[in-house]
């Protein structure tokens, strides 16, 4: 009978030890996966246009992730067509251009792989863009060039 008790204790100890080891291995694997897959998720960023602060509500795509890595950034945007401002970035960004068919006032998009565009009027279009985000409550911008600062 003593042998049965000793065997039961040994078996319980082995189960206890193996369960503890397995848990530690799983915890370590989860920890390394978390670190390997960590990405900073940002849903909005600040944009100052001629000293007026706005918020860009961001899309979730590779273009936005790459653009965030350029921040903070300051530049002058040029006028085009009485409805948009544009600036050619020094770096090309990944794209996923689609024919958006309609532009809404406040849309922020990428034309090609390095032309940042802010639309300040709504209209229909046949051009293709990669969506970056949208600025709510953007005032009408006049036909002058604008000074822009974008930061996290």
Image (cartoon, rainbow, N blue to C red):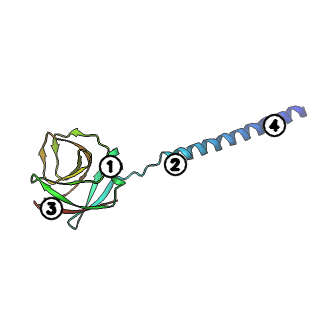
**Label 4: how many Cα within 10 Å (few below 14, some 14–19, many 20+):** few
**Label 1: how many Cα within 10 Å (few below 14, some 14–19, many 20+):** many
Q: Sequence order check: which comes first, mark 4 or mark 1? A: 4
Q: Disc 4 versus disc 1: distance between alpha carbons?
A: 57 Å
Image point 53% across, 44% down: which residue? Answer: 33
Label 4: element kind: helix
Q: Sequence order check: which comes first, mark 2 or mark 4? A: 4
Query: Where residue 81 sits: x, y (%)?
Result: 9, 51
Label 1: element kind: helix
Residue 94, picture quadrant: top left
Residue corresponding to mark 2: 35
Q: Sequence order check: which comes first, mark 3 or mark 4? A: 4
Is the residue 6 above or below the residue 103 in the image?
Answer: above
Specify whether residue 60 is in view. Answer: no
Image point 56% across, 46% down: which residue? Answer: 32
Tag nearer the camera, 2 or 4: 2
Residue corresponding to mark 4: 10
Q: Disc 3 versus disc 2: distance between alpha carbons?
A: 43 Å
Q: Disc 2 versus disc 4: distance between alpha carbons?
A: 38 Å
Residue corresponding to mark 1: 64
Q: Disc 3 versus disc 4: distance between alpha carbons?
A: 80 Å
Residue 145: assigned label:
3
């Amino acid at each position: 009978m003593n042998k049965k008790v000793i065997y039961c204790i040994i078996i319980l100890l082995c189960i206890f030890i193996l369960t503890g080891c397995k848990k530690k291995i799983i915890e370590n694997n989860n920890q390394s996966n978390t670190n390997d897959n960590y990405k900073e998720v940002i849903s909005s960023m600040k944009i100052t246009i001629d000293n007026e602060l706005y918020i860009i509500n961001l899309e979730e795509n590779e273009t936005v992730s790459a653009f965030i890595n350029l921040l903070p950034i300051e530049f002058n945007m040029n006028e085009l067509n009485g409805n948009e401002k544009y600036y050619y970035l020094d770096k090309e960004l990944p794209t996923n251009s689609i024919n958006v068919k309609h532009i809404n006032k406040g849309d922020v998009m990428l034309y090609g792989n390095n032309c940042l565009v802010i639309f300040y009027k709504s209209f229909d279009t046949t051009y293709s863009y990669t969506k970056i985000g949208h600025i709510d409550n953007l005032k009408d911008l006049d036909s002058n060039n604008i000074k822009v600062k974008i930061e996290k």
